[in-house]
Image (spheres, grey):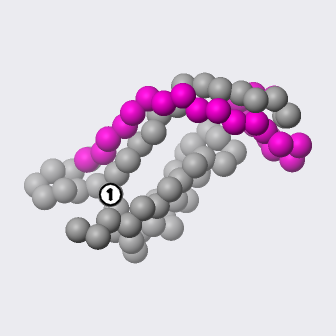
Amino acid sequence: MTVGNYDNVLSYSVVKGYWRPLEEANPFNGSKGEISFGTECKMEFKCLMKNIDEVKELIKSTHPYEEPVINVIPILS
């Protein structure tokens, strides 16, 4: 998370999330079969492609959700 002469560079925004846990789910929040919603924090940061798998595993191991949403978006600049 280094950009030039800066480290610990990230952005976050507060969003409202919606989800419905299916029968096989083990929800952190909400009940199976019922639509739930809550305030969530969406984070954005850069990392090297060679570190993607390690970063995803770190997020999964520390995030409270059973299946956190992780989007990897290549930046071509």
Residue 50's quadrant in the figure?
bottom left
Q: Magenta part of the protein: which range?
A: 9-31
Residue 16 forms part of the magenta stretch: yes
Q: Nearer the viewer, residue 35 or 12?
A: 35
Compared with 49, 42 (above or below) is: above
Taking the spot 89% from the left edge, 43% from the top edge, the residue there is 23
Compared with 31, 22 (above or below) is: below
Residue 1 forms part of the magenta stretch: no
Q: Main secondary structure of the magenta part?
A: loop
The residue beneath circle 1 is 46
Q: Quadrant of the N terminus?
A: bottom left
Taking the spot 13% from the left edge, 58% from the top edge, the residue there is 4
Taking the spot 46% from the left edge, 61% from the top edge, the residue there is 72
Query: Could you say where residue 41 lies in the image, as x and y percent from the top left?
Result: 47, 33
26 vs 41, left or right, is: right
Residue 10's quadrant in the figure?
top left
Q: Residue furthest bottom?
A: 50
Taking the spot 39% from the left edge, 33% from the top edge, the residue there is 13
Query: Could you say where residue 37 lies in the image, as x and y percent from the top left?
Result: 65, 26
